[in-house]
Amino acid sequence: MGITSEGDDIDAICIAPRHVDNDDFFKVLSAMLVKHSYVDSARPIEGARVPLIDLVMKGIPIDLLFCRLNRRTVPTA
């Protein structure tokens, strides 16, 4: 999961507690992202095997994947 050459993207994971669902990720988070000044574009891809938002931040392409833990909170370490 890294950038090895020009044109590659960054793969990142959004880890959320159990009360956050796909709808929150695709609708709420993607709406917040498109309003952010650093984000050039954000496109939710709901039909992918792994839920993800394809975004470009300050010209850098990023695949933001969604992972929900079966926990009330997300551990910090």
Image (cartoon, rainbow, N blue to C red):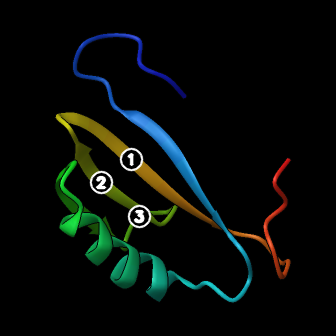
Residue position marked by numbered label 2 in the rendering: 54
Task: Work out which residue is located at the far front of the displayed protein and give it.
Answer: 37
Which residue corresponds to the image point at 39% horizontal and 74% vertical from the top-left?
29
- Disc 2 vs disc 3: which is toward the camera? 2
Q: Between disc 1 and disc 2, whose residue precedes?
A: 2
Residue 34: percent from left, percent from top? 20, 66
Which residue corresponds to the image point at 47% horizontal and 85% vertical from the top-left?
24
Residue position marked by numbered label 3 in the rendering: 48
Q: Is residue 47 left or right of residue 72?
A: left
Residue type at mark 3 is: Ala
Kindly check if marks 1 and 2 are in contact, taking CB atoms under 8 A apart as contact. yes
Q: Secondary structure at mark 2?
A: strand
Residue type at mark 2 is: Asp
Q: Nearer the viewer, residue 38 or 48?
A: 38
Q: Quadrant of residue 7?
A: top left
Q: Secondary structure at mark 3?
A: loop
Q: Between disc 3 and disc 1, whose residue precedes?
A: 3
Task: Classify 10 as above or below 12.
Answer: above
Q: Between disc 2 and disc 3, whose residue precedes?
A: 3
* Real-space CA distance between mark 2 and mark 3, rounded to the nearest whole angstrom: 11 Å
Q: Nearer the viewer, residue 37 or 8?
A: 37
* Real-space CA distance between mark 1 and mark 2, rounded to the nearest whole angstrom: 5 Å
Which residue corresponds to the image point at 49% horizontal and 23% vertical from the top-left?
2
Task: Classify 19 as above or below 62.
Answer: below
Q: Nearer the viewer, residue 25 or 38?
A: 38
Task: Work out which residue is located at the far top of the displayed protein and give it.
Answer: 5
Which residue corresponds to the image point at 20% horizontal and 68% vertical from the top-left?
35
Q: Quadrant of residue 17?
A: bottom right
Residue position marked by numbered label 1 in the rendering: 63
Q: Nearer the viewer, residue 74 or 18?
A: 74
